[in-house]
Image (cartoon, rainbow, N blue to C red):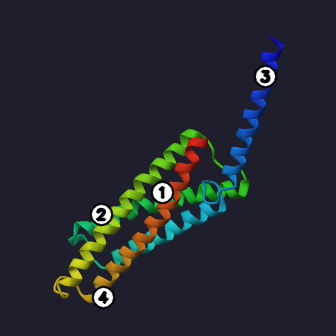
Amino acid sequence: MCLDAEFSGGMRAVQSAENFQNKMAMEGVPGLLGTSVGFSLRIGQTLFSSASLLFMSLGVEFYSYSAFCYLVTTMGLMIPWSCTLAVLDGYSVVVKCPVRQPGILFIIAAGDWVLSVLTLAAACSTASVVDLLFQTSGSFCTPKCCSRYQLSAAMAFLTWFLSLASALLNLWLLPSS
């Protein structure tokens, strides 16, 4: 009986040591929620999505194409999401207390994945419409306007790349919380 208690106590000590090592390994991963790299990813998402929205909105004819409207809507969702999470990351970095509550991490990981897929779809559809407009030899949009749309699509792809990185890192963090 005494041996069983000692054995189970020893197993608990080994399990708690493994949990501590896993937790320390996860805190050392750059790019996770509450780290300075995660903060940089969110700032990059905000800047690129704002640039994409700005380049698209400079041409007043963007509402003529549903793909362009879709990009504007998606970037309009991405900007407040990224700004809010950048503030959360910045606060976590300053206070040195990362967010590790499973419910909050699940919402953030799900939101990152949804917005990442939406951003990829918007960037691809915008790029294909811009390519189609370029191939019609400028009869539907001026070269200056089309180049702005092309820049907007490029910024949307950069936003998607940073969003995907955040989504993958937060998905990695989710099972450990």
Q: Nearer the viewer, mark 3 or mark 1?
A: 3
Mark 2 and mark 1 lie on one chain; the one further toward the N terminus is 2
Q: Amino acid at mark 4?
A: Lys
Write down the residue under mark 4.
144
Crowding at dot 4, Cα within 10 Å, few <14 / some 14-19 / many 20+, comes out as: few
**Image check: 135 left or right of 54?**
left
Q: Amino acid at mark 3?
A: Phe
- State the residue in front, 118 or 91: 118
Residue for point 60% across, 66% down: 40
Mark 4 and mark 3 lie on one chain; the one further toward the N terminus is 3
Which quarter of the figure has residue 103? Answer: top right
Question: Is the N terminus in the top left, top right, bottom left or bottom right quadrant?
Answer: top right
Which quarter of the figure has residue 139? Answer: bottom left
Residue for point 74% across, 41% down: 20
The CA span between labels 3 and 1 is 49 Å
- State the residue in front, 5 or 104: 5
The CA span between labels 2 and 3 is 61 Å
Q: Are marks 2 and 1 in contact (CB under 8 Å)?
A: no
Write down the residue under mark 2.
70
Residue for point 40% across, 73% down: 52
Q: Position of residue 34 (x, y in %)?
A: 64, 54
Mark 4 and mark 1 lie on one chain; the one further toward the N terminus is 1
Q: Amino acid at mark 2?
A: Tyr
**Image check: 13 left or right of 26?**
right
Q: Are marks 4 and 2 in contact (CB under 8 Å)?
A: no
Write down the residue under mark 3.
7
Mark 4 and mark 2 lie on one chain; the one further toward the N terminus is 2
